[in-house]
Amino acid sequence: MDNAKLHRMFSKTLFAVSADELRPALMGVYVQLLSGEFRMVATDGHRLSKIVDSQFKTKYKPVNMIIPPKAVQLALKNIAGEGTTRIMVQEKDAMFRIRRYHPVHSIGRRTVPRLRTGDSVG
């Protein structure tokens, strides 16, 4: 993924991440990697940030994960200038391949609630 685009998406969602440890599903950036879209969403119950890249293409199966704010901050510090970043996801880990730097972050097994049209949040 293009560094400038990934940096913008992380920057636009990080401010809304919750710091409340009693609500672990809100303590990170929720990322969806779909075949035709790349979505990032964050909320703390008061603020909501959602950004979508509808030009994203991947041949891999869809991924839903919550990336902790420390991992996002670390990625933001290292994503600078031109180039691309490769996001690799395993069962419990996400890795951002930025040039020669490969930070690995545990995303754990957090349950992400499924919402249907008409469901309310909160």
Image (tube, rainbow, N blue to C red):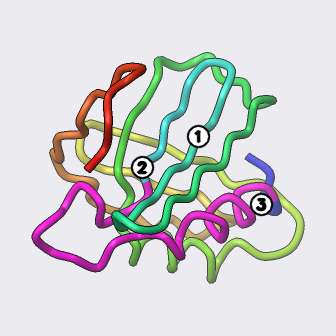
Q: Which residue is mark 3?
A: 3
Can you say whether 95 is above or below 52 in the image?
below
Tell me how many marks there are. 3
Viewer-nearest of discs 3 and 2: 2
Label 1 crowd (10 A; few <14 / some 14-19 / many >=20): some
User: Disc 3 versus disc 2: distance between alpha carbons?
Assistant: 19 Å
Q: Position of residue 3 (x, y in %)?
A: 77, 60
Q: Secondary structure at mark 2?
A: strand
Q: Earlier in the sequence, mark 3 or mark 1?
A: 3
Q: Please state which of residues 16 and 89 is positioned toward the viewer in this rendering.
A: 16
Q: Nearer the viewer, residue 24 or 86?
A: 24
Q: Are marks 1 and 2 in contact (CB under 8 Å)?
A: yes
In which image quadrant can residue 34 be found?
top right
Give percent across and percent down for residue 102: 51, 65
Q: Which mark is residue 7?
A: none
- Mark linked to residue 30: 2
Q: In the rendered view, would you say 23 is above or below 88?
A: below
Q: Is residue 36 left or right of residue 97?
A: right
Q: Under tag 1, what secondary structure?
A: strand
Quadrant of the rendered image containing residue 84: bottom right
Which region is colored magenta? 5-29
Instruction: Residue 39: give its label.
Output: 1
Q: Amino acid at mark 1?
A: Arg
Residue 120 x, y percent position in the rendering: 32, 36
Give, as a three-letter code, the residue at label 3. Asn
Marks 3 and 1 sit apart, C-alpha to C-alpha, by 16 Å
Q: Indicate left or right for 8 with 91 as reference.
A: right
Q: Earlier in the sequence, mark 3 or mark 2?
A: 3
Q: Earlier in the sequence, mark 1 or mark 2?
A: 2
